[in-house]
């Protein structure tokens, strides 16, 4: 079964600084997606960024970028120029193509942004 | 489009009562999911459906039932509520990851307390 591990239960960053959240996963599949979701106190799950496993190029979305290392099964999220609104729980998630295609989540990292 | 709509947003149940969490989506997605999120944890899959008339168990199905009579609706039934079912429940939907980018769209969550 696929598993997703986030080894940092909590992280903090100063406003305007850069922070990296770690994620590793385990799978025997070759075709899959990886995601970072943000969950603010409002509980809404918000997609931050996605990465297709077949793409070598790391995904970027404005201040958010990933470091995808397929062989190492590592998928870290870098947040640049951190803002107070970035404070939230961040979940790494894996989804295979085909079959149930269920999303498997890590336990999350709570990010605090200090002014 | 409304996206994924869950009702109710909050509910308090007594032990042994039953209830149904409603979920509907207007995006013509064939895949639908129910997750639960316990405090400080990631999301765990309860049940999922790959299309109308097809449902299957996830990681934590005990104490729950689902049905999928239409593409739009995927209700979650709690029978004989227990304190262990106190949680936040999320419904999600998507198209197949083989077709598009694999993103799941989430409802706003339903907070259930069993006393």
Image (cartoon, helix red, strand yellow):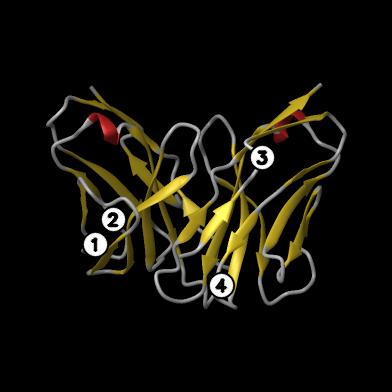
Q: Which residue is mark 4?
A: B100
Q: Position of residue B67 (x, y in %)?
A: 21, 58
Tag 3 near tag 4, CB within 8 Å: no
Chain holding disc 4: B
Q: Spatial distance from mark 2 to mark 4, Cα to Cα?
A: 22 Å
Determine the image quadrant of residue A26.
bottom right
Q: Is residue B61 left or right of residue A64?
A: left
Q: Closer to us: mark 1 or mark 3?
A: 3
Verify CB contact (< 8 Å) between mark 1 and mark 3.
Answer: no
Q: Position of residue B59 (x, y in %)?
A: 35, 55
Q: Are marks 2 and 1 on the same chain?
A: yes
Say whether mark 4 and mark 2 are on the same chain: yes
Q: In the rendered structure, are the residues bearing label 4 and label 1 in contact, judged by CB atoms less than 8 Å apart?
A: no
The answer to which of A105 and A60 lies nearer the viewer is A105
Q: Earlier in the sequence, mark 2 or mark 1?
A: 1
Residue B104 position (above or below residue A54): above
Q: Quadrant of residue B78?
A: top left
Mark toward the start of the polypeptide (2 vs 4): 2
Q: Residue at x 80, y 70 (%)?
A: A57
Q: In the drawing, what numbered circle is on residue B68?
A: 1
Determine if marks 4 and 1 fall on one subunit: yes
Give residue B115's position: percent from left, percent from top. 23, 22
Which residue in the structure is indicated by mark 2?
B74
Q: Is residue B86 left or right of residue A89?
A: left
Residue at image point 62% right, 47% down: A6
| Of B99 and B56, the residue lying toward us | B56
On the image, numbered disc 3 is attached to which residue? A8
* Up-down relation of residue A68 to residue B77 (above or below): below
* Other-residue count near label 3 (Cα within 10 Å), few / some / many at <14 / 14–19 / ≥20: some
Give the spatial CA distance, label 4 vs label 1: 22 Å
């Amino acid at each position: 079964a696929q598993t997703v591990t986030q080894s940092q239960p909590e992280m903090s960053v100063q406003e305007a600084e850069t922070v990296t959240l770690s994620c590793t996963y385990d799978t025997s599949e070759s075709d899959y997606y990886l995601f970072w979701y943000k969950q603010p106190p409002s509980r809404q799950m918000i997609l931050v960024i996605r990465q297709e496993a077949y793409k070598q190029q790391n995904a970027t979305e404005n201040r958010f970028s990933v470091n995808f290392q397929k062989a190492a099964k590592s998928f870290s999220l870098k947040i640049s120029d951190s803002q107070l609104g970035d404070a939230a729980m961040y979940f790494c998630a894996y989804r295979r193509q085909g079959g149930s295609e269920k999303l498997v989540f890590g336990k999350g990292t709570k990010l605090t942004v200090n002014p | 489009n409304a996206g994924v709509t869950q009702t109710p947003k909050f509910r308090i149940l007594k032990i042994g009562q039953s209830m149904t969490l409603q979920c509907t989506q207007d995006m013509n997605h064939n895949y639908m999911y129910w997750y639960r999120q316990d405090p400080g944890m990631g999301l765990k899959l309860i049940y999922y459906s790959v299309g109308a008339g097809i449902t299957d168990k996830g990681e934590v199905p005990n104490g729950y039932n689902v049905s999928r009579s239409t593409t739009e609706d995927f209700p979650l039934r709690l029978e004989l509520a227990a304190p262990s079912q106190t949680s936040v429940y999320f419904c999600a939907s998507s198209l197949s990851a083989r077709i598009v980018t694999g993103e799941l769209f989430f409802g706003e969550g339903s907070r259930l307390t069993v006393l």
